[in-house]
């Protein structure tokens, strides 16, 4: 997680500015991000099946190679001032790279915890992962902004590609599948069919899981947009469109807040008995913060609100993922988690361009407020999941689910 997040975060603070500098409009820049999510939508389940049938390690290695190549392609397209259709295609390939990670890495972690006798809460260990990611994001986003300021907007992309190559070497040498043995008794086509059927049964066919997945349409879509819109939003309030280090500050603030949020997740679970209750409270608070970014058009107030948004975002993720993992059997874990990510990507593919257009027509602040309203639509879905009274909603230790 340290290496992955460090690589990714080198461009998080300047990604939107990079796309705008390549000649894209706000609508096109966020539409490119939407195509990235569309790529995740298309490839999530197939790559999840690879993780469940070939192995989590193999999926991770494929992801690092794909992302390194696509990141280098992004840099070349920036040099060439490529047309929008090329950015759309490259963004979909970037989405393909991340889908190799999305279900596989988390499934690898949860299976390994079971294999090594872990008895604590999933919130605790996932929260520590969020802290590590926050530290990496803080370092990467600040350095990415500073490097872009000292050189140009393309250099952080080259640094990212280099780190991904290093992560491939590290994973090839050190990563092993623990607590999971791929079932290769069926042929690839039949195995894919079986995994998909079982994943649908344990995903959308499982009512409490279904409602959490559908909530992700609104929370993930708005979350993706808000993170990238915060860069030009801060520059707009600061009054200097070329202050790339200030754009990196937005990502750095979220990173620092992510450390706090990751540490807070287990505490929230101790204070709030049910996971769904915690998710409802955090979602409501996040929506209010996004609306406040429009109401208070001040640079320093915006910094405080961005930090608060980051804490809430980071605290929600371990609780949501622990709840999902405690309801999913090991054999279908990677595919179901990928399918959950797919549903969120579907929302983002629609929400991001729409909110980008709102920023063009009105302002970044207004688009964030609209995003806050959309984000709040997730609350009824969390409530529907709570009504199912699944034991995982009140679980305080990691569940051992091997057969579903």
Image (cartoon, rainbow, N blue to C red):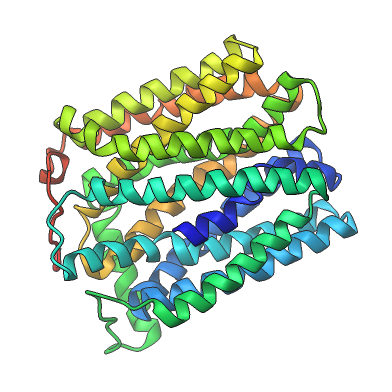
Image: 263 above or below 337: above
Quadrant (top left/top right/bottom left/bottom right) for the N terminus? bottom left
Whether residue 399 sits left or right of residue 306 in the image: it is left
Q: Is residue 321 left or right of residue 29?
A: left
Vertical position of residue 193 compared to residue 99: above or below? below
Residue placed farthest to the right in the image?
80
- Closest to the observer, 311 or 272: 311
* Residue in the foreground of this view, choosing between 79 and 88: 79
The correct choice, above or below, for 243 with respect to 14 in the image is above
Q: Determine which quarter of the picture holds residue 252.
A: top right
Q: Position of residue 71 (x, y in %)?
A: 69, 63
Q: Position of residue 309 (x, y in %)?
A: 47, 27
Image-quadrant location for residue 283:
top left
In the rendered image, which quarter contains the C terminus?
Answer: bottom left
In the depicted structure, whether residue 341 falls above or below residue 118: above
Q: Residue at x 35, y 60 (%)?
A: 106
């Amino acid at each position: 997680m340290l290496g992955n997040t460090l690589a990714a975060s080198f461009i998080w603070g300047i990604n939107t500015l990079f796309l705008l500098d390549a000649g894209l409009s706000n609508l096109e820049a966020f539409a490119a991000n939407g195509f990235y999510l569309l790529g995740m939508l298309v490839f999530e389940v197939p790559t999840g099946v690879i993780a469940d049938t070939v192995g989590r390690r193999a999926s991770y290695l494929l992801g690092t190679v794909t992302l390194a190549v696509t990141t280098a392609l992004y840099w070349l397209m920036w040099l060439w001032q490529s047309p929008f259709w090329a950015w759309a295609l490259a963004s979909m390939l970037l989405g393909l790279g991340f889908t190799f990670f999305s279900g596989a890495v988390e499934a690898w972690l949860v299976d390994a915890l079971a294999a090594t006798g872990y008895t604590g809460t999933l919130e605790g260990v996932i929260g520590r992962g969020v802290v590590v990611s926050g530290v990496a994001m803080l370092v990467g986003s600040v350095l990415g902004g500073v490097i872009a300021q000292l050189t140009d907007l393309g250099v952080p992309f080259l640094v990212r590609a280099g780190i991904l190559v290093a992560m491939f070497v590290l994973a090839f040498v050190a990563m092993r599948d623990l607590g999971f043995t791929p079932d290769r008794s069926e042929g690839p086509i039949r195995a894919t069919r079986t995994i998909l059927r079982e994943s649908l049964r344990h995903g959308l066919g499982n009512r409490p899981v279904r409602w959490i997945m559908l909530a992700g349409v609104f929370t993930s879509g708005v979350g993706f947009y808000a993170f990238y819109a915060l860069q030009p939003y801060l520059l707009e309030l600061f009054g200097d469109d070329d202050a790339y280090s200030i754009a990196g500050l937005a990502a750095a603030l979220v990173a620092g807040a992510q450390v706090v949020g990751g540490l807070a997740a287990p505490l929230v679970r101790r204070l709030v008995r049910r996971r769904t209750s915690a998710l409802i409270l955090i979602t409501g608070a996040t929506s209010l913060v996004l609306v406040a970014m429009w109401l208070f058009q001040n640079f320093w107030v915006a910094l405080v609100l961005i930090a608060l948004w980051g804490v809430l975002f980071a605290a929600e993720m371990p609780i949501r993922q622990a709840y999902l993992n405690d309801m999913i059997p090991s054999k279908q874990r990677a595919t179901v988690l990928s399918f959950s990510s797919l549903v969120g990507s579907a929302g983002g593919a629609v929400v991001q361009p729409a909110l980008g257009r709102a920023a063009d027509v009105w302002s970044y602040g207004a688009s964030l407020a609209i995003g806050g309203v959309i984000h709040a639509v997730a609350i009824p879905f969390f409530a529907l999941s709570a009504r199912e009274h699944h034991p995982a909603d009140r679980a305080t230790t990691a569940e051992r689910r091997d057969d579903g």
